[in-house]
Image (tube, rainbow, N blue to C red):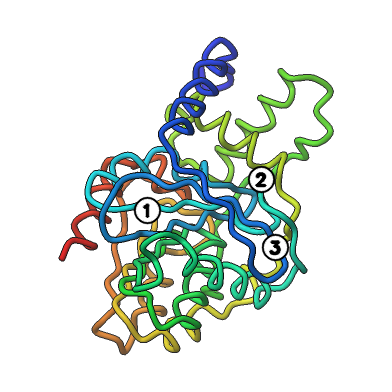
């Protein structure tokens, strides 16, 4: 069962994404010479969600509706990803463009909360440090921690797949090796979201994520921070990384989500949605 690719379900996943897109308010900003595409959901205090490397707004596909029940959720394709334009491959340029664009969004000029996943966690921490209007910051499996990594399986080059079946098999392998701990949770939506996101990635995030800098950004921000990892996240030792990032600050909370891997907000979406909703609640 583990190696079975649910081909017949993939069109259903694409249709579900299309239906979600129809609910969204689509906003396009221009900042730092870059066009950034945003999708907005719900009403209330704004929450901006930043996706990870080889990602897109679809990294939050299982979260936006739940979180939008109490707030306005803005999920962009970051520069160099998805439908957004390109930008020089530097963290500073990405942070500057996203920070300048976020305050252009309806309701965000007076402040917003911010969450980031993986590489987007490192970006979010730096955006929070650079702007005065970020309230609470939540980071899921953030890059830039500078600690050990636990990946055991090598990724395969999906670009060499000769047909759709081989592509789906490569994507499933990579999801199991890097993103999702329980193979049974690699469903058609995960395959669809990961495939679409990888195909539209141009920004090289890996060297930036592995270069460190997260602790420095958190120190510069100085506000309330939630740091969360899946128990089996291969990009970090969650206990050690959490201790290193939270040490010396009473304003940083660490949570480890049992049974989940790196893409924790997908694999354990119900737990993460409840965690984030409670943590952001006034």
Residue that carries the numbered disc 1 in the rendered image:
231
User: In which image quadrant can residue 192 be found?
Assistant: top right
Residue 171 at x, y = what percent? 65, 33
Quadrant containing the C terminus is bottom left
How would you rate the neighbour count of disc 3 (Cα within 10 Å): few for under 14, some for 14-19, many for 20 or more?
many
Of 194 and 78, the residue lying toward us: 78
- Report whether 1 appears left or right of 230: right
User: In which image quadrant can residue 222 be found?
Assistant: bottom left
Mark 1 vs 3, N-terminal side: 3
Residue mark closest to the camera, 1 vs 3:
3
Location of residue 51 with respect to 112 vertically, above or below = above
Location of residue 281 with respect to 2 vertically, above or below = below
Of 279 and 159, the residue lying toward us: 279
Image point (35%, 61%), residue name: 228
Residue that carries the numbered disc 2 in the rendered image:
83
Residue that carries the numbered disc 3 in the rendered image:
34
User: In which image quadrant can residue 49 be found?
Assistant: bottom left
Mark 3 vs 2, N-terminal side: 3
How would you rate the neighbour count of disc 2 (Cα within 10 Å): few for under 14, some for 14-19, many for 20 or more?
some
């Amino acid at each position: 069962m583990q190696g079975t690719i649910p081909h017949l379900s993939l069109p259903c996943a694409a249709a579900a994404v299309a239906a979600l897109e129809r609910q969204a308010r689509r906003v396009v900003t221009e900042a730092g010479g870059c066009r950034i595409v945003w999708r907005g959901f719900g009403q209330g205090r704004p929450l901006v969600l930043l996706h990870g490397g080889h990602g897109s707004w679809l990294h939050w596909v299982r979260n936006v509706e739940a979180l939008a029940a109490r707030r306005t959720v803005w999920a962009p394709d970051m520069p160099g990803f998805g439908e957004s334009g390109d930008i020089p491959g530097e963290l500073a340029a990405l942070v500057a463009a996203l920070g300048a664009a976020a305050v252009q969004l309806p309701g965000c000029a007076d402040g917003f909360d911010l969450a980031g996943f993986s590489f987007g966690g490192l970006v979010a921490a730096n955006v929070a440090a650079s702007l005065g209007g970020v309230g609470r910051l939540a980071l899921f499996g953030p890059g830039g921690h500078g600690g050990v990594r636990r990946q055991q399986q090598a990724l395969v080059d999906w670009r060499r797949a000769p047909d759709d079946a081989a592509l789906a098999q490569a994507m499933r392998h990579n999801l199991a090796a890097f993103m999702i701990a329980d193979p049974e949770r690699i469903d058609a939506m995960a395959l669809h979201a990961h495939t679409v996101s990888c195909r539209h990635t141009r920004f090289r995030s890996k060297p930036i994520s592995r270069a460190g800098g997260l602790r420095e950004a958190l120190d510069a921000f100085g506000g309330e921070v939630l740091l969360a990892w899946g128990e089996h996240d291969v990009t970090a030792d969650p206990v050690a990384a959490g201790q290193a990032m939270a040490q010396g600050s009473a304003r940083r909370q660490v949570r480890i989500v049992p049974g989940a891997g790196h893409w924790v907000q997908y694999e354990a979406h119900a737990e993460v949605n409840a965690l984030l909703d409670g943590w952001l609640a006034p």
